[in-house]
Image (cartoon, helix red, strand yellow):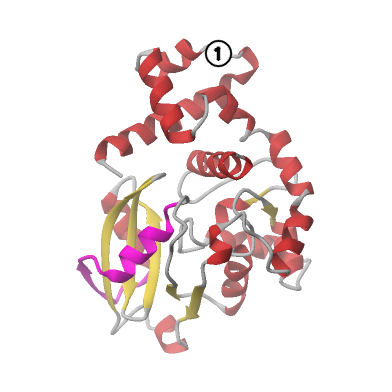
Amino acid sequence: MTIQQEVDFQRIAKAIHFLQENFKTQPTLGQIASHVYMSEAHFQRMFTAWAGTSPKKFLQYVSINHAKSLLKENNIAETTYQLGLSSSSRLHELFINIEGMTPAEYKNEGANLLISYDYYQSLFGTMLIASTPKGVCHIAYADDQATAFASLQQQFPKATYFQQGNSMHENALQALNPEDKDISQVKLHLKGTDFQLKVWEALLKIPMGNLSTYGAIATQIGNPKASRAVGTAVGSNPIAYLIPCHRVIQNSGIFGGYRWDPLRKTAIIGWESLHTAI
């Protein structure tokens, strides 16, 4: 993804927000384009190239009614996953190996850990990818690079950091491409409690183009009364997109919050729903 594509995504996000705020008035293509300071023809080409459809059709895939229909189908999707028959999500074909940090690594705030990090472009914006020698430990959207790095440092304040890419980053970056079908194993080295790790593993079972709820995840991990705790664990997920916390929404169909911007969550859900429906 080029710098221009990053700028385009920001315009697309702004357009999606405008559509959500004004859908009752059915704004014209010209009004949407004007809102993002583009000509009608240029905006149409840019949005269609990114989403694969028109702005108004895309709006259908980020509506509450569409979300509710996906939630109704969730049990079928989960059964398909358990049987190993799902082909709708390349993450189900990708073996993501989650390794929890040792108690010592967890408690000592990253002392003795060497963490390599760098910034990369993805379909949904700039990302910070970081890794220890054991695996990728952090993936986050980085609209502001300094803020994103500070967030990483808060997780491991005593670690030693090097800004440099490596093969683990490149492998993770390949997996971050929603259309890439030829992906190698991704190893994750995560700082989390046993409960958090269990929730994050459950998130991997939500197929691309499907949605789940906090309550459903709680039931799935055998603790149906722990919806609130599940919500906290989902919100603290350190691996953006690959551990798909963006696929968890409220029972009402409202998408809810997202640590990397709720509007980005909307864009991801819409893109995935559209491309698995095609």
Q: Tell me the quarter of the picture where residue 59 sits.
A: top right
Residue visible at 58% across and 60% down?
234
* Percent of width and height locating residue 9: 38, 35
The C terminus: image quadrant? top right
Specify whether 12 is left or right of 127.
right
* Percent of width and height locating residue 212: 69, 54
The residue wearing badge 1 is: 27
Residue 236 appears in the rendering: yes
Q: Tell me the quarter of the picture where residue 169 sits.
A: bottom left
Specify whether 104 is left or right of 230.
left
Q: Which amino acid does label 1 sit on?
A: Pro
Between 241 and 261, the one lying in front of the other is 241
Specify whether 194 is left or right of 69.
left
Asked whether 14 falls inside the magenta stretch, the response is: no
* Percent of width and height locating residue 246: 56, 51
Classify 10 Å Cα crowding around label 1: few (below 14), some (14-19), many (20 and above).
few
The N terminus: image quadrant? top left
Residue interval drawn in magenta: 155-177
Q: Is residue 55 above or below residue 125?
A: above
Q: Tell me the quarter of the picture where residue 114 sits.
A: bottom left
Q: In this view, does 60 lie above or below 141?
A: above
* Percent of width and height locating residue 84: 68, 68
Residue visible at 57% across and 67% down?
200
Total numbered labels: 1
Kind of element beneath mark 1: loop
Residue 153 appears in the rendering: no
Between 82 and 87, the one lying in front of the other is 87
Residue visible at 48% across and 80% down?
99
Specify whether 204 is left or right of 124.
right
Q: Is residue 159 above or below residue 147?
A: below
Asked whether 167 falls inside the magenta stretch, the response is: yes
